[in-house]
Image (tube, rainbow, N blue to C red):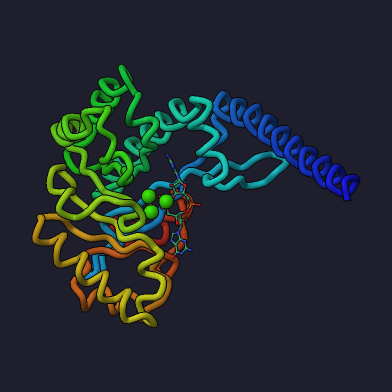
């Protein structure tokens, strides 16, 4: 039995070693990807439910690794956060999104607000970059960019979150609260912050058409959010039935595979903006 235990232990450490090795390689590759700008942004349309119009898009980062293929952001963003690489990556995402919004506006005459995910690590510690970003934004009219933050950030008492959000607001940036419902903040608490949109997490939208309690929950969130002056975006909408229910319970916007997966900027343009060309 003792021997078996030792073997198991051995096996365990070996796999931990493998994991650590894999992680180290990924960090190296990520560093290189940052240097060679090996990233791309995909865009997923956000649909206004009352009109069916696409007025917004969420920018989602993509990394195509020459050997590994596509590495999902859920895998490399946490590593980027641990290593500080999130700063150059986040900066690139932001610059790229501002450029894209300005390009669609100038070339096609359409106003598409682009939503950018902002890592809490970056938000906490962006220092001088912050002023740079406000500068970058001056090439856009107000409302061209929205940042998506998560609930955990609002509970962080070490940083002056509301002041920072105010400076963004002054620069014409709107703010979304991402993954709402998965954290701990209450709706009443959100009143303290200037938040424009609540994004209801996919785990709630997922079963809205089969689970009555999920529907009740979404309905309550929407009513309260509206009373507090926020609009609501439902994430992860995959079926027409889900979209119809959300519209019926007065959800403002919807986003999900039912409308489109995240696509390249040229595909987004072809599929969703061509008809709007003047
Ligand atoms: P998120 O911000 O909650 O983004 C939504 C995720 O759900 C995206 O995954 C999107 O492709 C996926 N999704 C959209 N519609 C549906 C649907 O109908 N069904 C299902 N099952 N999934 C749907 P993705 O692109 O893999 O991104 C995962 C996470 O990685 C994001 O979650 C976000 O937290 C992070 N992320 C992505 N891009 C960036 C970025 O540029 N910066 C930072 N800091 N984080 C990013
Ligand atoms: Ca998001
Ligand atoms: Ca989300
Ligand atoms: Ca998420």
Q: Is 95 displayed left or right of 176 in the figure?
A: right
Residue found at x 39% / y 31%: 121
Quadrant where the C terminus is found in the figure? bottom left
Q: Nearer the viewer, residue 79 or 251?
A: 79
Find residue 167 and report its horizontal and vertical position in percent: 17, 30
Whether residue 112 can be seen here:
no
Query: Where 167 falls versus 115 (above or below)?
Result: above
Q: Nearer the viewer, residue 169 or 112?
A: 169
Residue found at x 67% / y 46%: 69
Q: Is 108 displayed left or right of 202 in the figure?
A: left
Q: Which of 179 and 118 is in front in this view?
A: 179
Quadrant housing residue 46: bottom left
Find residue 135 and report its horizontal and vertical position in percent: 24, 23
Find residue 26 and report its horizontal and vertical position in percent: 65, 34
Query: Where 185 falls versus 200 (above or below)?
Result: above
Residue extending furthest toward the right: 3
Quadrant housing residue 52: bottom left
Find residue 62 and report its horizontal and vertical position in percent: 53, 44
Residue extending furthest toward the front: 2
């Amino acid at each position: 039995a003792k021997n078996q235990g030792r073997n198991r232990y051995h096996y365990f450490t070996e796999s931990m070693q493998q994991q650590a090795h894999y992680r180290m390689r990924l960090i190296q590759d990520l560093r290189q990807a940052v240097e060679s700008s090996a990233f791309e942004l995909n865009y997923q349309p956000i649909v206004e439910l009352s009109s069916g119009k696409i007025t917004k898009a969420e920018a989602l980062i993509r990394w195509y690794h020459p050997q590994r293929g596509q590495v999902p952001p859920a895998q490399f963003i946490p590593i980027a956060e641990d290593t500080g690489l999130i700063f150059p990556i986040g900066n690139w995402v932001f610059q790229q999104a501002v450029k894209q919004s300005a390009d669609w506006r100038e070339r096609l005459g359409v106003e598409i607000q682009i939503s950018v995910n902002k890592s809490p690590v970056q938000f906490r510690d962006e220092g001088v970059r912050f002023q740079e970003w406000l500068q970058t934004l001056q090439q856009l009219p107000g409302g061209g960019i929205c940042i998506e933050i998560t609930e955990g950030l609002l509970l962080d008492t070490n940083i002056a979150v509301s002041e920072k959000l105010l400076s963004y607001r002054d620069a014409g940036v709107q703010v979304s609260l991402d993954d709402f419902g998965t954290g701990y903040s209450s709706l009443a608490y959100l009143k303290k912050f200037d938040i424009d949109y609540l994004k209801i997490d996919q785990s709630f939208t997922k079963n809205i058409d089969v689970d009555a309690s999920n529907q009740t929950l979404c309905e309550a969130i929407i009513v309260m959010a509206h009373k507090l002056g926020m609009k609501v975006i439902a994430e992860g909408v995959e079926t027409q039935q889900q979209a119809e229910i959300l519209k019926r319970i007065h959800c403002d916007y919807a986003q999900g595979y039912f409308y489109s997966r995240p696509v390249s900027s040229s595909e987004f343009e072809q599929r969703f903006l061509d008809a709007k060309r003047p």
